[in-house]
Amino acid sequence: MMGGYLVYLNGKLIGDIGDNELFLKRTPTSDTLLADSELRYPYEGSKTLMHVFDRFEETALVLELLDGMYAELPEKKPAKARRER
């Protein structure tokens, strides 16, 4: 069961934080730019995500990563309308 925090970028889910570690979803951009990152399960029953560490000083890399991931991830699905009784 998840016990951390979800990370969103302009309304799109890009990853999560658990046990003081950042995990990002896999996209073509993240696979390319973070090729040396370890794939892990952030919590039992999850999909594998990219474990990210100590790369945040590389500003150009982070900006390219977030721009690419945002373009590749799907839009948030609209909430279903509630039915009147």
Image (tube, rainbow, N blue to C red):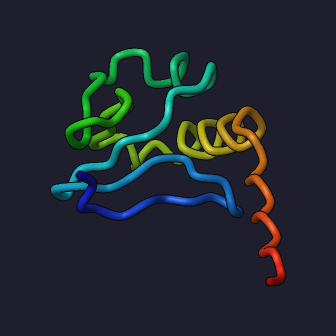
Q: Residue furthest bottom?
A: 85
Asked whether 46 or 63 is in front, the reply is: 46
Looking at the picture, how far across and down is residue 77, in whole percent? Answer: 76, 53
Q: Residue at x 74, y 53 (%)?
A: 76
Looking at the picture, how far across and down is residue 43, in whole percent? Answer: 22, 43
Q: Can you say whether 66 is above or below 33 in the image? A: below
Q: How many marks?
A: 0
Q: Can you say whether 84 is above or below 18 in the image? A: below
Q: Residue at x 63, y 58 (%)?
A: 9
Looking at the picture, how far across and down is residue 31, in whole percent? Answer: 51, 19
Q: Is residue 38 left or right of residue 60?
A: left
Looking at the picture, how far across and down is residue 23, in whole percent? Answer: 36, 42
Q: On the image, which quarter does residue 17 sit in?
A: bottom left
Q: On the image, which quarter does residue 34 sit in?
A: top left
Q: Is residue 20 left or right of residue 16?
A: left
Asked whether 2 or 40 is in front, the reply is: 2
Look at the image and tell me in which quarter the C terminus lies: bottom right
Q: Can you say whether 68 is above or below 6 in the image? A: above
Q: Is residue 41 left or right of residue 55?
A: left
Asked whether 65 or 46 is in front, the reply is: 46
Q: On the image, which quarter does residue 79 sit in?
A: bottom right
Q: Residue furthest front?
A: 85
Q: Residue at x 40, y 49 (%)?
A: 57
Q: Residue at x 28, y 43 (%)?
A: 54
